[in-house]
Amino acid sequence: MEGIKDKVAIVGMGCTKFGENWQKNVDDLIVNAAYEAYQDAGIEQKDIQAAWFGTTRLITGENLAGVLKFDYIPVTRVENLCATASDALRNAAFAIAAGVYDLVLVVGADKLKDLGTGGLDSAEILPTARVDYPGVAPAHFFARMATRYMHHHGLTYEELKQTLSKIAVKNHHNGSLNPKAHFQREITLEQAIKAPTISWPLGLFDACGVSDGAAAAVLTRADMAKNFRDDYILIKGLGLATGARQGFLQDDCEMAHMEETLRASRQAFEMAGIKNPLEEIDLAEVHDCFTITELVICEDLGFCPPGKAKEFIDAGVFELNGKLAVNPDGGLKCFGHPLGATGLRMVYEIYKQMQGKAGPRQRKHPRLGMTHNHGMNPGSGVGSVTILGQRD
């Protein structure tokens, strides 16, 4: 099977500030992200041959065409839970690699604060989820994973709570350095540990919020990328795995890891030629919808052995200046989570880091980065992994 490694380049990106963007509608966010990407790539909108639009709202590709005033080019709307933007990028990359188009746009956008709810259980966002899991908020699913993790790996509540709180403190520190993050303030370990419980054993600072935001990317063939810029970024590998609710059907499922993440990472690592993720990857944006999710993801991605994340977190391995920086931009924890935009927001951070343009968050000479999304819950869902890097 022929892979996609080094066949597709990202030559321009844009990202709005995430947050409570009451003064803007989703159209404004789309325009801002797209035109930042155009300017970054040094192109005009008329140069775009096709577009992919990631959103979880009940709107179509025609909406993107109308907002950006495209001239009858193909526009495809993509929705795949929390992996929506990542999957939109994946589909666009395959079209470029196949030689169908030379220059395309990918946009991810959602505006969730206007819904007036504090969670993601709105029928407008996840209509099927309300049928399958009525009245169950995401925090309950991931609290269940946290309790199973404690049981499976023999941790006490106090040990787990302190470890999860260290993740929250790390991500808030990183987010405080990012002007586009929703939450830009640091917190203390004591604040995180003593925060009100939202679903035991998870507290307030263990959860990300919902948000408004948009991000965009301009993709082209790798052999054309130098026509746009010298510091372009290459796609090295892509992985996507969709569960069939095996976690709910198998009575021996320990619910302390996410098989979709494991399978997607294997696909992407094989395509990129990665043998040892901890040694080869410089930074990773992972789907920290909850702190327990980040902990488990680090194990599933092979950054540390199963059950050993606590030791790596205690040693500072995943901090901004650690061996492998996890969520250097603050993650979902500080950006919030407009589902249709999150995956591309993660790519934006890797893109800027690879170009040496991440400001006070900048890693020293990064060569390889990755993004990860997981949609739905620990029992089933969608796992998505994207590997990005500089030219060899």
Image: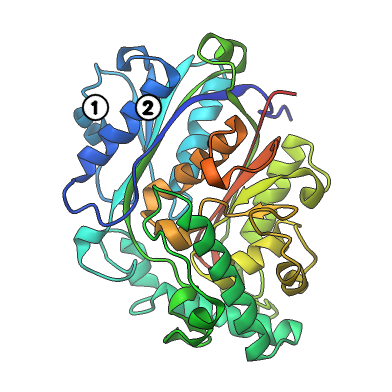
**Of pointers 1 and 2, the one earlier in the residue sequence:** 2
Q: Horizontal and vertical percent for residue 16?
A: 34, 42
124 relative to 230 in the view: left or right: left
Q: Residue beneath label 2, please?
A: 51
Marks 1/2 in contact by CB < 8 Å: the verdict is yes
Q: Considering the image in quadrants, where does the N terminus appear?
A: top right
Q: Residue beneath label 1, please?
A: 68
Instruction: Find the residue positioned furthest to the top.
Output: 227
Between label 1 and label 2, give the one nearer the viewer. Answer: 1
Element under label 2? strand
Badge 2 local density, few (<14 within 10 Å), some, or many (20+)?
A: many
Q: Which sits in the foreground, 303 or 50?
A: 303
Vertical placement of 58 versus 105: above or below?
A: below
Instruction: Find the residue positioned furthest to the front.
Output: 360
> Gap in Å between the C-alphas at discs 1 and 2?
11 Å
Numbered label tally: 2
The residue sitting at 43% across, 78% down in the picture is 204
Vertical placement of 37 versus 159: above or below?
A: above
Q: Where, by quadrant of the figure, is residue 42 drawn?
A: top left
Tell me which amino acid carries mark 1: Leu
The residue sitting at 34% across, 77% down in the picture is 134
Tell me which amino acid carries mark 2: Ala
The residue sitting at 60% across, 85% down in the picture is 147
Q: Horizontal and vertical percent for residue 192?
A: 50, 79
Element under label 1? helix
For residue 84, say whether it is visible: yes
Q: Where, by quadrant of the figure, is residue 312 drawn?
A: bottom right
